[in-house]
Each structure stands twice: as C-alpha cells, then as structure tokens.
Image (tube, grey):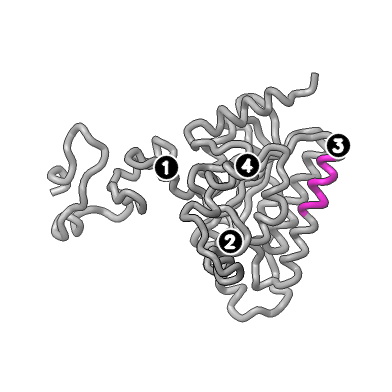
Amino acid sequence: MLRDLFSKKKKYATIPSEEAKQEVPEGLMTKCPKCKTIMYTKELRKIKMVCEGCQHHFSLSAYERIHLTVDDGTFEEFDKDMIATDPLDFPTYLEKSELDRKKTKLNEAVVTGAGKIGGFPAVIGVMDSRFRMGSMGSVVGEKIARAIEHAVREDKPFIMFSASGGARMQEGVFSLMQMAKTSAALNQLHEKGQLFISVMTHPTTGGVSASFASLGDINLAEPKSLIGFAGRRIIEQTIRQKLPDDFQTAEFLLEHGQLDQVVSRHELKDRLSKILELHQPQ
C-alpha cells in the first residue's frame, strides 16, 4: 500500500497507518524531527539532507559532508588508520570504540585530508558525531593538529567542520590536552598568514567549542546549530536565571557577535569557494 501513502506530486506525506508502516522497508523514508514531515530518504539526500518543509538540517557523516563540499576526485585523506588506545584503562572504552568503528566504518571521530573547493585548494577536517558523539580524544586532536601543520607546510588554507559533544571523558587529561595542542597548531597557521575557516554544525559543544572551533579567522555555522560550552540546565542553575529559548543557537551567537555568518547547507560550498577565492595570494 505504499502508493496510497504518497501523492504523485509530493515527495513527502502525512504519518501513515500502522498497517502501512509495516509494509515500508527500513531506511526507505525519513521523518523530520522538527516538523514531522516524512520524506523519501533518496529524495532527501538529493537536497543535501535539508527538510523541504521546515529547513531542518539533518546530521551528516564525515564522508557525506566531504562529498557535498569537496570537488569530485580531489580529496586525499590523511592518517586514516590512526586508532586510539586506552591510556586510563577506562571500563568498556575499547569495546565501545570497536562497536563505533563497525557502525560508522571510521577509525575515529574526525576525517582529515586535502582537496579543492570550487577549484581552490584547502586542507579540510570533518568531525563525525556518530563516533563517540564526535568527542575529542588523543587521536582526534592529533589528526587535526597534523592537518593544520600540513596546511602550514603547504601554504594552504584550513577549513574545519565541527560536530562534537566536547572532550572525550574516557581519556581524561589526555583529551583536555588536545584543546591546547590544536590551538597551538592554529597559532602556527596564523603566524604563517594562512586562512582558517571554522564551520560549526549541530552540535558544537564542550572542549571543542572552547578551543579550535571558536578560533577561525572566519566563523560560520549551519542554521539552528547548538553551539556552546556548558549545557543550558547547568548555566541556569549556576546563574539562577532563565535563559532565552534560542540561547546557544547559531542565530543567537550571530546576533551577539560570536559568528560571522549563518549559512544554509545549500549555499555553503559556494560561500566557502568565494571566501577562498577572495583570500588567494596575489
């Protein structure tokens, strides 16, 4: 009864009956968590995983982001085989990391490499929130630092797409050290006079938001992204005040001068290409 769920003119439909749901193959349709519109997953991918009804930006995997952003055939990945150890003997950490590797087909929560965007070369890092919620451990910090150092050596701009719950608690102080490591690497890029574009996506929080994600020469974000350090409830309990409904959203940060632009995913590649063009050496 699939044909009864959809009109021929629309790519989405209202919520189907329980009988109809049982006949729908898993993964065929995706429901928007905001407006509850149900769309064909195949059609949703064609529009860059942005809901047609409410413009909600679905999360992307690292490789999906690279596919949408980097020119075809130009991406060269760095340090793909780096895998974290368990420096604190944290219970079940290695087992859960292995489960994430099988689920995501990634060895860690960030993919780094070099490619071209609109024909302009850049070094790129993309975090993936499916792997340990995109948390920054030793390997994530090391891969980002190495990518920045590559940009320094090759005189290329660096673009970082953040999507993270913050520092990885299973690695304790080793994780916190990555905040300093990545920030120090970015200082080398700054001293070399190379461009750093930070693109914050949903969510960018904790130690990631408090380190490299906020250090861009140009700071961009996708619409409605959650961006902040501590959680809303903790802040409200600390200051004993009710926070605005849009607190820690990309739009709130833009209004208060912490972002340069909020850019729809449909326009992001063109915007990055234009920024790279404007910063090409004379």
Q: Amino acid at mark 1?
A: Met
Q: Which residue is mark 1?
A: 49
Check disc 3 and report its element: helix, strand or loop.
Answer: helix
First along the sequence among labels 4 and 3: 3
First along the sequence among labels 1 and 4: 1
Q: What is the spatial separation of the Cα atoms under label 4 and label 3, in whole angstroms?
A: 23 Å
Q: Residue furthest front?
A: 241
Which residue occupies 32% across, 51% down?
31
Q: What is the spatial separation of the Cα atoms under label 1 and label 3, in whole angstroms?
A: 36 Å
Look at the picture and state if 87 lies above or below 65.
below
The quadrant where residue 84 appears: bottom right
The quadrant where residue 48 appears: top left
Q: Which residue is mark 3?
A: 192
Check disc 1 and report its element: helix, strand or loop.
Answer: loop
- Tell me if residue 183 is in the magenta stretch: yes
- The magenta-colored residue range is 182-190
